Image (cartoon, rainbow, N blue to C red):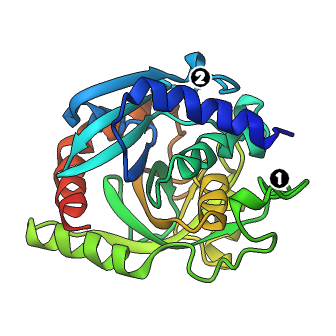
Amino acid sequence: MYTIQQYKDSVQYIRECLDGFEPELLMILGSGLGGLAQKVEDPICIPYGDIPYFKRSTAIGHVGRFVAGRFGGKNVLMMQGRLHAYEGHTMEEVAYPVRVAGLLGIKKLIVTNAAGGVNLKFAGGTLMVMSDYIKFTLGNPLIGENIPEFGERFPDMTYAFDKEYRQLFKDAARELGDNVEEGVYFYMTGPQYETPAEIRAIRTLGGDAVGMSTVPEVIAANQMGMRILGVSLVTNMAAGVLDQPLSGDEVIEAGEAAAERFQRIMTAFVERM
């Protein structure tokens, strides 16, 4: 386990790099969505590998760095790429950047991901605001000795995703003539894609989209009292929905195809926060 001093060492390094810039919002950019960081004004880039105790991201399409600057009229800190359990990281390591951001004083989080569509009403390119999540994996960033600086030992998860933020995002999309869905995100560790039988089970249990990220970060952020918006880009329909195999290249291609639309809606939302 990490000590609170290790977290503070990471915070100190980032503060020195930011040189007085104080971010108010953390944005985690998922697979295929990292291009949003190019919209940041006067960017300050901090590779994860340069930060004490940080792990490097090895996932496809994840640059693996913080990008700080102005976006949508706000001071933001973007994660251009994230960590996943399937890379061999513990849940604590996956949540480490979010906790560091919390210790920096950030109280708002936007977390995005690429996901497979489980809801049969969805199609590739659908944007889904997360109303809730389902997690059936054993790992959890809260397991182990509790560090009081992170919050309550037994945090409530009733309102993991902020209701006001969810409505603001949908309103922003509607004003731009677009439409977004709302649904439940089902977390699986991967890295293999789910079987058709697993997808049928996920649908029965109430999942609308499935992916390999987000939930560990949301748990840690919720414990620290952050207000959270979660958005999934449905890059493809999950296994068994269509009679075709799945591929990682498809995820990246779908992210690139939806980039302009995603950026437009996200900018409008951040302006309204």
Seen as rendered, the residue at the extreme front is: 20
Task: State the quadrant of the N terminus.
Answer: top right
Q: Is residue 191 in view?
A: no
Q: Is residue 148 in view?
A: yes
* Three-letter code for the amino acid on which mark 2 is drawn: Ile
Q: Position of residue 152 (x, y in %)?
A: 75, 71
Seen as rendered, the residue at the extreme right is: 144
- Where 98 falls versus 143 (above or below)? above
The residue tagged 2 is: 51
The residue tagged 1 is: 139
In this picture, residue 219 sits left or right of residue 61: right
Q: CA distance from mark 2 to mark 1?
A: 25 Å
- Residue located 79% across and 39% down the image: 90
- Residue located 70% across and 58% down the image: 150
* Three-letter code for the amino acid on which mark 1 is drawn: Gly
Q: Position of residue 177 (x, y in %)?
A: 9, 68
Residue 196 quadrant: bottom right
Q: Position of residue 247 (x, y in %)?
A: 52, 33
- Element type at marker 2? loop
Instruction: Specify few, some or many for label 1: CA neighbours under 10 Å numbering under 14, 14-19, or 20 or more.
Output: some
- Element type at marker 1? loop
